[in-house]
Structure formats: structure tokens, C-alpha cells
Image: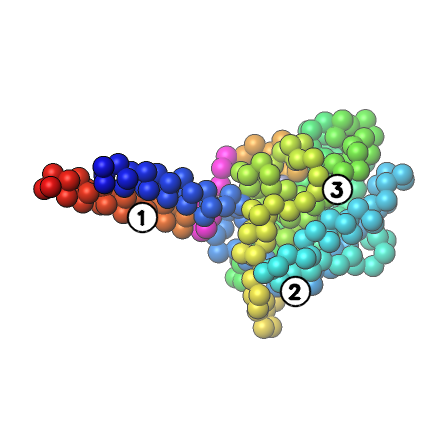
Amino acid sequence: MRAAFAVVVCWLALAVGAPLTGFAWTLNGDDPAMKGWNTKVLRVSLATGECPPGLDMRSLVLAAMDLWSHVDGAEIRLELAGDASSKTTAKGARAGEAQDSPVVVCDTDFKTTTSLDVNSIPGVTGISVDRDSRRVAYAYTILNTQRDAMADIATLDLTRVLIVITHELGHILGLGHSTDPRAIMYPDVTTLSRATLSDDDVAGLRHLYPPGGTDDGGGCGTIADVNRRESRGRGDRRPPSAPSRESLSSLANFLALLALCALALRYFRRATKNV
Ligand SMILES: [Zn+2]
């Protein structure tokens, strides 16, 4: 009887404890030591030269920035640099030549610039991480505005465009993809119905931008000194990354709980035999 009680208690503890402690976010670059930008206020440029005329890109980018800027426990705020008048081109940004990085730029020649599938990928973000400081040092987002493409953002509804931009800003901030389908950082953004941050996105941002997490006098590297990678906003099915520190720690907690339960069961079985 006591053994049965112990089994029920253990089952409940495992069922409740495991999902509450696990997160699915990853870092953009597979480097567990990577940190965010070395600033509390990140000024993002916007080049609207090749954006659809009917789309208010400035308002959309501001709305996406707002979502990432008000997370309790994360010390980072995003601001729009200038008035959406950046002259940076997508090809220049990808070549590491953007003087106003991080920058969001529309590209009517998305296929040539990125070599990606224009019918399924609405956006792509590349970041560079300084080898010494491990901080994000350069970033760009290229939005697909190729006229004949199925993933041209001009063909998407406004909510979908906002989701895409929020997802790409997450990459600019240093987040990789999440395996949680509720997360804005889930690789296939078509699964979401509204632009909002999930608990998993919030946990990832807090990891990259903890309160007091900036360096005093820390510098940014040049494009020649950095590691580079790109992440896409939809249909990116790359193999799962290495587990994050949080997921490893939750796995350790889960295994410790399992071991405790096994010990408790052994004790109760022995006690029952002795009765
Ligand atoms: Zn992505």
C-alpha cells in the first residue's frame, strides 16, 4: 500500500516537474558561451528602398521592436535608428559592409542575394560574433520582397509580416531557433496566429541580456574577426542544435528526481517486506 502511494507521488512529481523546468530556445551560432550585444539600447537601422510601397515598414518594425523591448528580467531595448532612410543594400549587408548594422533591409532580388527558396522563405538574418568577447558584433535581416515570389512579404497579411519581422529581430538579438511551436523563434512561423513572445522566447532573451550584463569598455570586433552564420525565418529544418544550459540543467533535475523516486520505492518495498 505504502509502495503504491510512493509510485503515485513519484509519477505526479515527474509529470509536473519535468515540463516546468525545460526550455527549448537556442543561441544563434551554436556557441554556448555566446552573449548578446554589448549594450542596453540596440539601435536598428531600416532600409525601405526596396520595400513594398503599400506596407508601413516603419510601424511594423517599431511594433516588433516593442515586443522585445519590454521583457521583465532582460536588460535590452530596441530603437529605430534614424527615420528608415538607410541606404544599405541587401548585398552590401550580407557582404559585411553595412555601416549602420544591425540593419533590416528589403530585397527585390532575394533569390540572387541569398540563394534561398523565394517561395517559402520570407526573411533571413545573418549575425557575426566577436571571437574574443563572444558578443554579437554585426547583424542584418534581409526581407523577401521579390515581386514574383510566393513568400514576398507584400503577399502576406500584416500579422504574418509582423511575426516574420519579430522572429528575425530575435535572430539579430542572438537567439537561434526554438523547438517549442508556441515560440516566435520556432523555425516555421506559419504555425503562429499572432505576434507575441512565449515563455520560451522570454527565457532565451533573459539569458542573453541579464540585468547588469554589459561589459565596461567592451568593444565590438570587425567583420574580419568574427564567426558568421545565417538563420532563416521559415522552412529552416536544420538539425537540432546542442542543448542549451537550461535544458541540460532541467534534464539533470529530472534524472535526480528519478533517482530519488527509485530509492524511495526501494525503501518502501523493503519496509513492506519487513512488516
Ligand atoms: Zn529563423
Bin the neighbour count of mark 2 within 10 Å (Cα to Cα): few under 14, some 14-19, many 20 and up.
some
Pointer 3: what residue? Answer: 162
- The disc at residue 256 is 1
Residue ranking furthest to the left: 274
- Label whose residue precedes the other's in the sequence (1 or 3): 3
Q: Where on the image, by quarter, is ligand 1?
A: top right
Q: From what the image shows, is residue 75 above or below residue 9? A: below
Q: Earlier in the sequence, mark 2 or mark 3?
A: 2
Query: Could you say whether the residue bearing mark 2 is in a helix, strand or loop?
Result: loop
Residue 260 in the image: state x and y as whole percent: 27, 47
Q: CA distance from mark 2 to mark 3?
A: 23 Å
Could you tell me the amino acid type at mark 2? Lys
Residue closest to the eye, 23 or 267: 267
User: Identity of the amino acid at label 1?
Assistant: Ala
- Magenta run includes residue 234: no
Q: Is residue 174 above or below residue 239?
A: below
Which secondary structure lies at badge 1? helix
For ligand 1, tell me if the residue under mark 1 lies within 8 Å. Answer: no
The image shows residue 82 at horizontal and vertical percentages of 83, 59
Provide the residue span drawn in magenta.
Answer: 239-247
Which residue has dot 2 on it? Answer: 40
Q: Position of residue 244 (x, y in %)?
A: 47, 48
Q: Would you say the magenta stretch is mainly helix, strand or loop?
A: loop
Within 10 angstroms of label 3, few (less than 14), some, or many (20 or more) residues? many
Q: Is residue 146 left or right of residue 250?
A: right
Please name the residue shown 84% across and 53% down the image: 84
Q: In the image, is 14 to the left or to the right of 158?
A: left
- Residue drawn at (51%, 43%), measured in percent from left and top? 24
Numbered label tally: 3
